[in-house]
Amino acid sequence: MHRRSDNTIEFEPRDLGHYKGLIVTAIILIVLTVGAWTSYYIVQPEEEAVVKRFGAVIAVKQPGLHFKLPFGIDKVYSVPTARVLKEEFGFRTAGVGDRTRYRKTAAETAESLMLTGDLKVIDVEWVVQYRISDPNKFLHRVRDPQKTIRDISEAVMRRIVGNNLGSAVLTEKRVQVATMARDELQRAMDKFDIGIHVNTIELQDVTPPERVKPAFNEVNQAEQERERLINEAEKRRNQVIPRAEGQAKQIIAEAEGYALERINAARGEADRFAAILAEYQKVPEVTRRRLYLEMIDNVLPRTGRLYIMEPGMTAPLPLLNLGGDSLNTNTSSGGQK
């Protein structure tokens, strides 16, 4: 290269060759740099990578550093298989920070309003939590897996809510509805074979529409009052019935004891009579006299006062004064006279 008198630059042939060599070297360096940059990839700890070559899946890689063919020959698609994903229905999380904010637009309201089995309209908000179990199936079985999950979940929830009473869904059947929806959604995912495992379905707010909330609150208060009265009645029943059962058992035990006492007494009397009969058969006269004296000894103390009236007497003559107090009184009266 040299400068002419008219200030123009003239390149010599050897200079052109030198520049061509520099250009080729630069291109080679660029190609090597791009090749080196695109020949490796890193899979994060909670992800798995699906490697495709010319559109065909050739491998599913675990977390770590891996190498591939450069220049876009091998393409890598990262799928968060270890992360629990969620889909929200009836509301959306607007912001997460010190205080989580939610929003509910007309579109979210439309997907959460449902008709129950008793033709009532309720507002059901729920969250589907799921995990990707097979990244290859998740990417290639359906065109839009998230939309598929949302459509099937909404259809399942509407069917289950439509087969139950509105009052039951609002109160005691919330857990049962969530469990049934989770099982049915999992069966649908298995049928489509899209590599998704449904962890849980959680019902958030299940409320009546805003216009009917006052009437619903009155009904709810009436139901709570009914439950309170039922619980009080159950409490009273649990108190009275055991007491009555205890009294009945006590009466039965007393009756059984009395029956046993009477039976034993009767058996004792029978045995005594049999013994007396045996003695009577041996010596009838002595036994007859002994029985007579025993009877007199048993009867006379209970006869009270005994009076013998003689003809012509105006006052009774006490012959046997069997009462000690009367005897003392008469004696005292006689002594005073």
Image (spheres, helix red, strand yellow):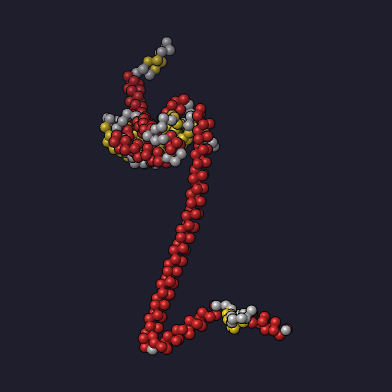
Residue 126, horizontal then vertical, whole percent: 43, 35
Residue at 67% from the left image edge and 84% from the top image edge: 331
* Residue 32 in view (yes/no): no
Q: Which residue is at the front of the view, 223 or 77? A: 223
Query: Against 39, is 295 above or below?
Result: below
* Residue at x-position 35% and y-position 40%: 183
Question: Is residue 13 left or right of 296 when viewed as pictured?
Answer: left
Residue 274 position, x and y percent, is 38, 81
Q: Looking at the image, is 331 positioned above or below residue 182?
A: below
Q: Is residue 202 above or below residue 2?
A: below
Q: Please identify the residue farthest to the front as the structure is shown.
A: 312
**Left or right: where 294 falls relative to 322:** left
Asked if residue 296 can be seen in this view, the reply is: yes
- Residue 223 drawn at (x, y percent): 49, 39
What residue is shown at x 48% (from left), y 32% (from top)? 208
Q: Quadrant of the C terminus?
A: bottom right
Taking the view exactly as shown, the residue that stands out farthest to the top is 6
> Which quadrant would the N terminus be assigned to in this image?
top left
**In the foreground, 250 or 4:** 250
Which residue of the protein is positioned furthest toward the right in this rendering?
A: 336
Relative vertical location of residue 265 with respect to residue 44 in this rendering, above or below: below
Q: Nearer the viewer, residue 213 or 273?
A: 273
Can you give x and y, in whole percent of width and height, for residue 280 in the image?
A: 39, 85
Residue 130 location, quadrant: top left
Give the residue drawn at x 40%, y 83%: 276
Q: Does 87 sit left or right of 192 as displayed?
A: right
